[in-house]
Amino acid sequence: MAQLQQPAHPENCVAQDEVQDQLVAGLLAPHAHVSPKYLYDVLGSRLFAAICELPEYYPTRTEAAIFEQNAGAIAAALGPDATLIDLGAGNCSKAARLFPSLRPKQYVAIDISEKFLREAVSALQQQFPKIKMTSLGMDFSSELELPAAVGAQRRQFFYPGSSIGNFAPLESLKFLHNIRKSIAGSEGGLLIGIDLVKDKAVLDAAYDDALGVTAAFNLNLLNHVNRLLEADFQPQQWRHRAFYNEAQHRIEMHLEARQDLVVHWQDGGMRRFAQGESIHTESSYKYTEQGFIDLLQQAGFGKVQTWSDERNWFMVCHARIA
Ligand code: AVI
């Protein structure tokens, strides 16, 4: 599993009952929904890695090029001797690419899947023996209490991949606020990747690719829910739908019933879905440059520096504490 990019296996760290209660509540809501975190079981994480290779899915390669082309300026913005705190580190590859220019004093990798993370960090430690490395298994989306092992000075949080887009705007503000509060000293900041608003056709294609990899990624959520809830979803009865909602500035991913059907789950739970009815599985918010800077400032950050590609499709942003 060398390509994990997102928190995987939510059942590893949240009580099983809580997971099941959340899933049932979402499935029984008038507009059924399932949290996007359930897209990431083992197969889902691999399918997401494949999405990142697709010609239509521009964010990964565009962000990587921005980091590469601006490595010196980004390192200068973060400053020397940083404690680099990687949120959703996965295989740690994105942070590792910053090490030669940034030379952090400490690297703290955080992800839900701690076992996988520990293996990635110990491999990286061999390559960069001078950087102190720590791995932490935690769900950073809800809390950011960092242990004493994390250096308090020059904390630079790292949240690439436009993952913040998967939070609704109010959750994003709360999350940014939690990061701001966790920057203990007077120096520190946040380095973050943001997907920008652009032509609808480009966005629609990025989330509904010709090979159907994103469709498989979305449909695989049903298999994951079947395991978590002893449910009997049949993926072939569902269709992937993804489109850019211009009014809400977000991609929406849904699973739409191809026919009238009934789904059952443990303890006698069930729901009928009429043909065309859908389950909302993910939103991916897109920002304007100014819109995201305003959000950072509302969350208490100060000076912001940005770097973008020539098409202005993606932005890397460094925000200092005020
Ligand atoms: C992880 N996240 C930033 C991806 C996105 O673009 O919102 C997840 C994804 N969903 C479908 N394709 C990619």
Image: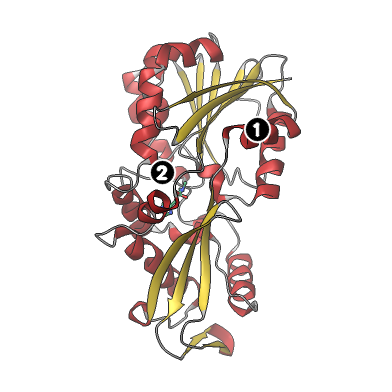
Residue 315 sits above or below residue 267 on the image: above
Residue 166 sits above or below residue 294 on the image: below
- Helix, strand or loop at mark 2: loop
Identify the residue shown where x is 57% and y is 44%: 138
Q: Residues within 10 Å of mark 1 (few under 14, many from 20)?
A: few
For the residue pair 4 and 280, the one nearer the viewer reads as 280
Give the number of the disc on residue 161: none
Q: Residues within 10 Å of mark 2 (few under 14, many from 20)?
A: many
For label 2, being within 8 Å of ligand 1 is answered: yes
For the residue pair 31 and 146, the one nearer the viewer reads as 31
Spot occupied by residue 246 in the image (x, y as percentages of width and height)? 55, 55
Kind of residue sitting beneath label 2: Gln
Identify the residue shown where x is 72% and y is 29%: 297
Residue 159 sits above or below residue 17 on the image: above
**Relative horizontal placement of residue 108, taking residue 303 as reference (left or right):** left
Question: Does label 2 or label 1 sit earlier along the sequence?
Answer: 2
Q: Is any atom of residue 145 visible in this view? A: no
- Helix, strand or loop at mark 1: loop
Q: Which residue is mark 2?
A: 5
Residue 53 sits above or below residue 32 on the image: above
Identify the residue shown where x is 33% and y is 45%: 52
**Relative horizontal placement of residue 173, taking residue 38 as reference (left or right):** right
Identify the residue shown where x is 41% and y is 16%: 71
